[in-house]
Image (cartoon, rainbow, N blue to C red):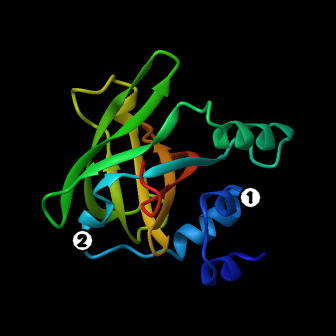
Amino acid sequence: MTVMALQKSVLTLDDLARLSAEELGGLYQAGDVPANLAVLNGATRGRMLAVTALDGSPLAGLVRTIAASRFFPWEGKSFDTRARKSGHGDNRLRLPFYRGHWFGFRTRFGRSLLDGAECIMLDYDSVANPRPVRRIRDELREVVPGLYMGPAMWRRRKGGPLLLLWFALDTRQSR
């Protein structure tokens, strides 16, 4: 199924997880940005879709299978947006003897580090986060109503951002 055919259909997290990193990039570039960040409010269901360094390797399928399993510790993100254009949120993690919210971020509209077009930015640069986490930046665009996806990137001191992985959030399936 081509990316354009996928765009016209009802996508699920499972559908996105079957795409290559290149196809995910094309879908992200074709995505839209909502007028109001409040559409993300609540606990979204998340899925890691592809680790870019592994894409196309024999390990890629194994990583995608683990990411789809109930044993994968990342459940998604929670958002709290009281203003139309900014807010905050955090990541929901489930470990063997702990379930909680870690690694907070601020949300706002801005320009993508990948293509310069508008996106929702998730900025982890806060003293509340461990120093390495502060260098992470996620971006989101809506690919079908209620389904958002984007890159997780590492902001390097020199050069452009390093694309680490693709992930998706489904507001239609809150947890």
Residue at the spot 33% in from the left edge and 46% down from the top edge: 78
Q: Earlier in the sequence, mark 2 or mark 1?
A: 1
Residues packed near mark 1 inside 10 Å, few (<14), some (14 to 19) or many (20 plus): some
Residue 40, quarter of the rendered image: bottom left
Sort mark 2 into few (<14), some (14-19) or many (20+) by Cα contacts within 10 Å: some
Q: Which residue is depicted at the point 71% across and 44% down?
A: 64
Outermost right residue: 58
Nearest the viewer among 103 and 54 is 103
Q: Is residue 69 above or below residue 3?
A: above
Q: Say above or below: 79 vs 4.
A: above
Image quadrant holding the N terminus, namely bottom right
From the top left corner, tell me how far across and down residue 112 is, in percent: 41, 62
Q: Which residue is mark 2?
A: 36
Q: Secondary structure at mark 2?
A: loop
The residue carrying mark 1 is: 18
Which residue is at 17% across, 67% downward? Answer: 84
Out of 103 and 55, give the one closest to the viewer: 103
What residue type is disc 1 on?
Arg
User: Mark 2 is on which residue type?
Assistant: Asn
Of residue 75 and residue 162, the one placed in the foreground of this image is 75
Q: Residue at x 35, y 30 (%)?
A: 102
